Amino acid sequence: MSGDGLTTNLNDAQKIAVQTTDGPVLILAGAGSGKTSVLTRRIAYLIAEKQISPFNILAVTFTNKAAGEMKHRIERLVGYHSQKIWIGTFHSIFGKILRNEAEKIGYSKNYTIYDSDDQLNLVKISMEYLGISQELYSPNIIRAKINKAKNTFQNPSQFHKSVDNPMDEKAALVYTDYEKRLRQASAFDFDDLIVKPIELFQQFPDTLTFYQEKFHYIHVDEYQDTNRAQYILMKMLAAKYRNLCVVGDDDQSIYGWRHADIGNILNFEKDYPEASVYKLEQNYRSTANILQVANEVVRNNEIRKDKSLWTDKAQGKLITVFECDDDRAEAKNIAQVIQKKIQQEKIRFADFAVLYRTNAQSRVLEDALRQMSIAYVIVGGVRFYDRKEVKDVMAYLKLISNPADVISLQRVINFPARGIGKTTLEKLEEFSQVKNMPLFDAFRNVRSFGAGLIQERTMAAIVSFCEFIQKYQELRTQMGFGEWVRILIDELGLLKMYQQENSVEAISRYENIVELLNAVSEFSMKYDAEQAEEPVLEAFLKEVALVADVDKYDENKNAVTLMTIHSAKGLEFPLVVVAGLEEGLFPLENARNNARELEEERRLFYVSATRAQRELYLSFAKRRMRFNNIYQTDRSRFIEEVPAKLLDWQKISTYEPRLFEGSGKSWQSKNYSGSERVTAYEDGPSRVKKSLKDFSDEIVTSAAITETKYRIGQQVIHASFGTGTIKNSEGQGDKQKLTILFGDGVERRLMVKYANLMVK
């Protein structure tokens, strides 16, 4: 496509942003303002009009989904040239650089990436080695402090100098030992994928020069979400040519808890005084009323760039506010609104998104949707690759790729059971520390030092385990990847073990391992050995390690989407419900007296509102169950900040006494005029206890309702498998399973609790 063609259909602000190619550029792109189109056309313009080699262009974003969309659009604009551009997430781009350069800083190019669970396990190992009590000092808090130190680019020595309390002092000691163990394991945690390239460039200036010469033109999407380390990395790479184009919106900076620094985008013009700045304020997504709500709320923030979204679309409907008696009434009302809309307007389940501030809010919403047979999906639940049985298999794959990976080794050494006890492991660990060698090398050398210390039977088991790992290191080059993984799982006997156990949990684990084999097969089919820069096993491990919840979001699945507002960023839906707009919940309690955190909560509301294309619903409950207590609540200040003329207020009175509510000081006897209100979610006079028995009673009642819905011969609809006929039913309540013959001729056994079936 020609240069002129690349600016067709762009507004004036978008056009000049595309055509300004040299020097630093800041594009302030409001929600729904077409930033992806501007960014991709700018890259295409560099290639087609400015004759810049695609080899010299870098584009970095935060999710695989966004990177995939960018690649797809650029390919449509410039064809095969797009394959030569480096496009990807921060972690994938700099992970790729580390694959090429890691040996310079003492790591294997086949390094392992440790996820948050692996990281926590390593922190605990360090704490145990240092004699630091895990009861007095939380491993999770220490891990968080290490993460923060890395994100703010503090090494162990720098962090140690800044400590001013006992917890930080212990964290500094653990940080030092933790880093030593990571190096021994040739492993990086997620933060290292950003921090280690900085160290690489500082220690090897020639390597930095190489990548500066490679990346003449650098683009960063969602710049408001960058942390200190990412900021330093981009500044280093752009230092020579200063052709750095950043795109972002300070009003959508919502990751402060993940150490994102809004100052990076706010201070861009201080870093680059010669920068060109363009504001994209025309919105192509939402109605005028929705945009006015977002503008009115976010302008209450003081720390922001001045801008205001506008659209040439119609005003649209007023924003509906639901005032509900309690959280169950709120959930029931949301389900009824969805059902009514679908029946009256013939829209799809997938047109709806229900957004909430915390994951804990999803349970009552799920219950309401299930009871009305509304199909839904949750984005941000337990990741497939975080499930125990999947992590077990993945640990074997990681260990075969990188035998120095101590976390994977410790996970699999006794799974399946081999009779290698804790005492033996401690002796091997001690030997590896004394000899300063990876733990797996100590395993391989067990006969050289183990006589008299370790029983012969145990040494034989260790030797057998090492031979097993070596066998599959050799076999991986002799057969296809999918076949290799299947044989590995067969020899371990995992599928047979879960099949013989035959419990509901075991069946689920069996199915998850089969699904992992499917994932391996799919990856094998798309893996191109000739084009790939690394072997198939390492490529698969990297893809799995860097996948995010939103990357798995399937917009083609016909189901209502439930997700946190953080997960919804970058997505859009025709109809959006924002649930739980109450003081103490949204905004969160700890933000109410902290100006900086409160502004981030307000930006979060702005993000939630601007996900809506046609209709926006705001909902709150006057009472909410939380932490086994019921509290009376006040509606969120964010609703108060919206002009009344934009709101259609509806009171929803469907209050039903909870099973555990009785006489006396129960909610039924409360005066709801406001005289007894307490701060949301704090201990106070309106708290009511709920016992475990009460919980079980409520679950039984819910299950009894569920099991009466389905009968043999009935037709049902599943969000993924389509229409099917019920052939058999087993169990009751949460354990009820249906055998369903679907239109593709396949019979499937599904658990009612998770199937989200809709009666046809």
Image (cartoon, rainbow, N blue to C red):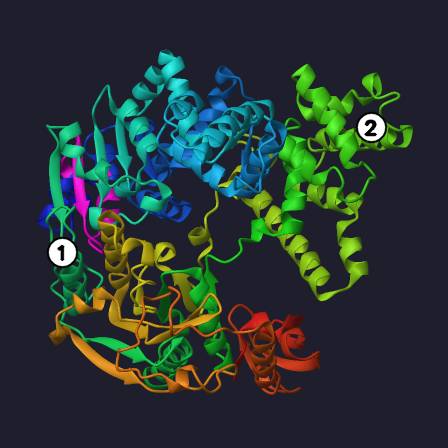
Distance CA(mark 2)–CA(mark 1):
66 Å
Please tell me which residue is depicted at 22% across the width and 38% down the height of the picture.
Answer: 263
> Residue 264 versus residue 701: which sits nearer the camera?
701
Could you tell me if residue 348 is visible in this image?
Answer: yes
Q: Quadrant of residue 45?
A: top left
Amino acid under disc 2: Val
* Rendered location of residue 587, percent (x, y): 29, 60
Q: Quadrant of residue 565?
A: bottom left
Q: Which mark is residue 318?
A: none
Mark in front: 2 vs 1: 1
* Rendered location of residue 113, percent (x, y): 53, 34
Magenta stretch, residue numbers: 19-42
* Rendered location of residue 546, percent (x, y): 48, 41
Q: Disc 2 marks which residue?
A: 463
Please tell me which residue is depicted at 18% across the width and 68% down the height of the picture.
Answer: 640
Residue 759 magenta: no
Q: Secondary structure at mark 2?
A: helix
* Rendered location of residue 726, percent (x, y): 64, 81
Q: Secondary structure at mark 1?
A: loop
Marked residue nearer the N-terminal end (2 or 1): 1
Residue 648 vs residue 185: left or right? left
Q: Residues within 10 Å of mark 1 (few under 14, many from 20)?
A: some
Q: Residues within 10 Å of mark 2 (few under 14, many from 20)?
A: some
Please tell me which residue is depicted at 61% across the width and 84% down the height of the picture.
Answer: 704
Q: Is residue 588 above or below residue 574?
A: above
Q: Disc 1 marks which residue?
A: 299
Residue 289 vs residue 172: left or right? left
Residue 642 vs residue 471: left or right? left
Please tell me which residue is depicted at 87% across the width and 30% down the height of the picture.
Answer: 460
Q: How many marks?
A: 2
Residue 24 magenta: yes
